[in-house]
Every structure is written in structure tokens, then in C-alpha cells.
Image: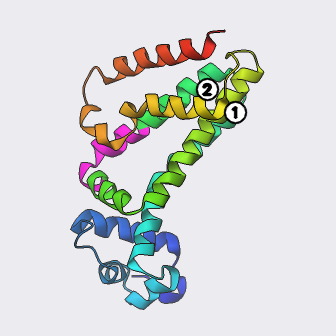
Amino acid sequence: MTTDSALTPEQILSATEEVLRRFGPAKATVVDVARSLGVSHTSVYRFFPSKAALREAVTQRWLDQAHHELQSIATEPGPAADRLHRWLVTLFAAKRKKALDDPQLFATYMALVAETSTTVEAHVGTMVAQIGQIVRDGVRAGEFGPTDVASTARAVFEATAHFHDPAHAGEWSDPSAQDRFEALWKLILGGLTIR
């Protein structure tokens, strides 16, 4: 049980995730979240002014969970080709883990994501910018040929969508998925390094 004075946004978001897992997005309510925390629903509303705001915040947190690790890869020193490959592998592994380890929660989040298009657009924008940073580094170091960084980053993201877009989650458990990813990576790398 949490007291109103000790309540934090992070506790509310964690409780919301559990309530969503238990009831699904159609039935989960702010009252359910408050009840699971042992507080009144008005305590939850002090941090999140509406059910929609709470759902958007929990979706944002879920989408951002991989950003920190991906950002670290994007900004670390080292060959751009290695970093880009590791960035893409990390993204694919994170998405696959979410989809396969907890399919019910993954489906719940997909329903929430459909409600919050601006959150998803910002998430995609962040990831494309990280790819762009790696591509820019590769061009500057002479690893990659001259290119328009922004359009190339977007093209890499879109070309690999099969391995991170939730629409393809049903195919991620296929034993050949990793081999197909590596074949695509070779094509992408070849396109980046052609001069």
C-alpha cells in the first residue's frame, strides 16, 4: 500500500502496466490503478490529469525503454558500420523480446500505441535521428560514401521495418529470422559503402 504523500509518477506507471496486463486496455481504469496502489483515484489524477494522459505516459515509457541503450550505441566511438549493425541488432532483439516474452502485454501496448500517434511519431523520430548520427559519423570517417544523412537514416529504418515494426511480430519467432536480418544488413552495408 502506498500513501498519497509517497506516491510517485513511476509507481503509478508501474501499477498501470500491471493493471493493463491484468484487465487489458478496454477494461483498465484509473480507479483500478489507484486501487492497486491503495490510494484514491484523485491521487493518480494529481500526476496525470486524465486517463488518456496516463495511457500516453505509460506508452511513452514502454517505447522509450530501448532508447537509452540505442542512444549509447549511437554516440559511442568506434567504426560506424559496427555501431549501426549493433544498433539494429539491439532494436530487433528488444522488440522481439517484448513480443515473445509477454505477448499479452505486447498486444495491450499495440492497442495503446494506436491511440497515441504523436507519441509513436516522436519515438520513430528519435530512432531515425540515432541512425542518422551513426551514418553521419560513417560519412565523416570515410567508411560510408557521401549521402544525404537524413534520408539515408530514414531509408535504413524503413528497410529494416520487418525486424522492428510490431506488424511483423508474428514472424519474429521464425528460426530463420536472424539469417534474414543478416542478409538485409549486408545489402544495407553494401549500399552505404559504395562510392
Q: Position of residue 119 (x, y in %)?
A: 48, 59
**Quarter of the rendering occupied by the N terminus:** bottom left
Residue identifier under label 2: 83
Query: Could you say which quadrant of the image residue 79 lies in?
Result: top right
Q: Which residues are magenta?
A: 94-105
Residue for point 45% across, 74% down? 53
Other residues around mark 1 within 10 Å, as few (<14) / some (14–19) / many (≥20)? few
Residue for point 65% across, 27% down? 135
Q: Describe residue 127's horizontal placement relative to residue 104 as left or right.
A: right
The CA span between labels 1 and 2 is 8 Å
**Magenta-highlighted stretch: main secondary structure?**
helix
Q: Position of residue 4 (x, y in %)?
A: 48, 88
Other residues around mark 2 within 10 Å, as few (<14) / some (14–19) / many (≥20)? many
**Quarter of the rendering occupied by the C terminus:** top right
- Helix, strand or loop at disc 1? loop
Q: Nearer the viewer, residue 31 or 183?
A: 183
Q: Amino acid at mark 2?
A: Arg
Q: How many marks?
A: 2
Question: Image height check: is 14 above or below 96?
Answer: below
Pointer 1 or 2: first along the chain: 1
Do the CB atoms of the residues marked 1 and 2 lie less than 8 Å apart? Answer: yes
Question: Image height check: is 161 above or below 15?
Answer: above
- Helix, strand or loop at disc 2? helix
Find the residue positioned furthest to the top: 195
Residue for point 44% across, 69% down? 13
Query: Could you say which quadrant of the image residue 178 lies in?
Result: top left
Q: Nearer the viewer, residue 35 or 65?
A: 65
Question: Image height check: is 5 above or below 174?
Answer: below
Question: Image height check: is 18 above or below 195?
Answer: below
Residue identifier under label 1: 76
Is residue 100 magenta-colored?
Answer: yes
Q: Amino acid at mark 1?
A: Glu
